[in-house]
Amino acid sequence: MPTTDLTPADPTPVLELLNGFRASKAMFAAAKLGVFDALSGATHTAAELAAKLGLDPDAAARLLDACRALGLLTAHGGRYANTPAADTYLTTASPSRMLGYANYSDTVLWKLWEHLDDAVREGTHRWQQAYGWDGPIFSSFFKTPEAMREFLMGMHGFGLLSSPVIVNAVDLSPFTTLVDLGGATGHLTIAACRRWPNLRGVVLDLPVAIPLADEIVAATEVKTRITTAAGDFFAGELPRGDLYAVGRILHDWAEPKIHALLARVFDALPAGGGLLIAEKLLHDGKAGPTAALLQSLNMLLCTEGKERTLAEYAELLTGHGFRNIVGVKTSAPVDAILARKP
């Protein structure tokens, strides 16, 4: 007679995912309430911190203990302190902070992700459903220079993790002038000029982003080799260079806009010029990496784009005449692709 297998399936993946959003929200709430700023360079008991921040003492203690379990705080003798990760990435005074992106995730992306099921049904972003916005999410959300600055600083924190890895992953020695399209704070250009002494750089971005780029570039030892330019890479003449870069740009757009941008870059490049792409690559079978697959869903919710495999990027690039396409997977939040114009 057949026997019934009474061995239960491992519930770990389900249980971890049931709790996943709780961990994110605990970090977001602690950041919003000022916990990490209050513990920057200081220690406090739960009662002291509750009094300082105007919180309920028992609820504050629960949040602090949860953040300790999540690796964001330590506690000794009942006194809490930031871990190095919290000090570096979640305090307003840190030049490497990701706080702006954490707040953006909490206040903007959180509401978009509520509608993931509808996005999958319809295959479109959720701007209108979540916020009543008809235009792109970035122009609608960043209504003040302060909001834009903090978001850009959050992305700068990501860039400090990624850009030094990207410019070491591929050989940029044949090039002399890097033009970073949508270069934000200039982190990729700065890293490239540090790594490759032969390079000069141009950071191109919208006018609202340029003051922060100027500020950050001016504080580096490579400032004399970098300039900034205000402009839209979809319109107007591109600054001249023999290497263009697009970091976390192509995954924002639907293919018609990607084709338009690649055509503009190819036409602007001299023979032998290159295009450096920084995006997280999906595995060929699209079974991972998990972070890239989740980011692709995020792109569905908040942009027109998606993540791709190296083969999919190569198809886009070869269609515009690029050749000698090399992809390098890294341990950083993005990978590197280098393509050349014959």
Image (cartoon, helix red, strand yellow):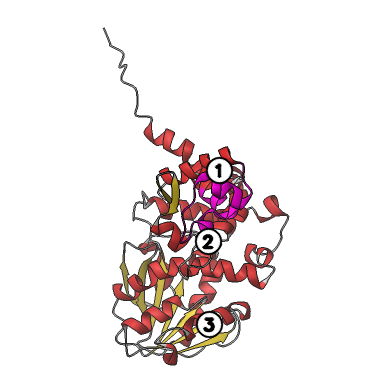
Return the residue at label 2.
99
In the displayed image of the protein, which residue is found farthest to the bottom? 224
Q: Work out whether residue 246 or residue 16 is closer to the camera in this orientation and state it.
A: 16
- At label 3, counting other C-alpha atoms closer than 10 Å, the crowd grade (few under 14, some 14-19, many 20 or more) is few
Identify which residue is drawn at 62% across, 54% down.
107
- CA gap between label 1 and label 2 equals 20 Å
Tell whether position 28 is magenta: yes
Judged left or right of residue 151, residue 316 is left
| Residue annotated with mark 3 | 215
Give the residue type that dot 2 points to: Leu
Q: Which residue is painted at 42% across and 76% down in the image?
A: 188
Picture quarter with the C terminus: bottom left
- Which residues are drawn in magenta? 27-56
Q: In the image, 328: left or right of 123?
A: left
Residue located 48% across and 86% down the image? 218
Question: Which badge, 2 or 3, comes first in the chain's sequence?
Answer: 2
**Residue depicted at x 41% and y 53%:** 291
Mark 2 to mark 3 CA distance (whole Å):
19 Å
Q: Nearer the viewer, residue 323 or 164?
A: 164
The dominant secondary structure in magenta is helix
172 over 39 or under it: above or below: below
Give the mark toward the camera: 1 or 2.
1
Q: Secondary structure at mark 1?
A: helix
- Counting from the top left corner in percent of width and height, residue 4 is at 31, 13
